[in-house]
Image (cartoon, rainbow, N blue to C red):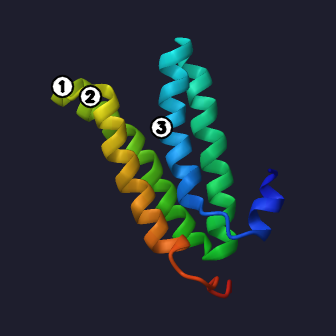
Amino acid sequence: MSTASLMRTRFPSAVLVAVGLAAGFGVAQGTGVRALGGAVFAAAGLAAGALWVRRRSVPVAVGLAALYVAAFVLAHVLAIGVGLPAWLAVSLVTLTAAGVTFAVVDGSREDAPVA
């Protein structure tokens, strides 16, 4: 599904957040190629960002993008710094970021008008 067709549907952007964080981690772990996981993370984030701008506004999109990147960083802090198992750290930040995204953008049945 292209980004253009995603924007015309009610596809939940929270799914893209979850895919970017969890699948990005899984791809990096599974292949041993961190850059490939980063590419999944970046592609999902860009697609989600396009939806956020269209459905809400640029300031909301910037805030959610900051949350998305902060979740990525926090997963590393929890796994490396605190010592949580990596999958647990990724799961916690993914659930949180996707939940906030759903509440802010996807939970409403109607799109807010974009100014």
Task: Give the SS element for disc 3.
Answer: helix
Q: Going 45% across and 46% down the picture, which residue do you hit?
A: 69
Contact (Cβ within 8 Å) of mark 1 with mark 2? yes
Q: Which residue is mark 1?
A: 83
Q: Which mark is residue 71?
A: none
Type of amino acid under label 3: Ala
Q: Position of residue 49 (x, y in %)?
A: 63, 58
Q: Nearer the viewer, residue 32 or 107?
A: 107
Q: Position of residue 53 (x, y in %)?
A: 65, 69
| Crowding near the residue tagged with mark 3, few <14, some 14–19, many ≥20 C-alpha atoms within 10 Å | many
Which marked residue is nearer to the observer: mark 2 or mark 3?
A: 3
Q: Is residue 11 left or right of residue 107?
A: right
- Residue 27, above or below 31: below
How many numbered dots are placed on residues in this image?
3
Q: Is residue 46 left or right of residue 68?
A: right
Which marked residue is nearer to the observer: mark 1 or mark 3?
A: 3
Q: Which residue is mark 2?
A: 79
Q: Is residue 103 left or right of residue 111?
A: left
Q: Name the image quarter holding residue 77.
A: top left
- Residue 96, above or below 30: below
Task: Give the SS element for disc 2.
Answer: helix
Choose the circle earlier in sequence order: 1 or 3.
3
Q: Which residue is mark 3?
A: 22
Q: Name the image quarter holding residue 76.
A: top left
Type of amino acid under label 2: Ala
Q: Position of residue 48 (x, y in %)?
A: 62, 56
Gap between marks 1 and 3, in whole Å? 18 Å
Q: Position of residue 40 (x, y in %)?
A: 62, 34
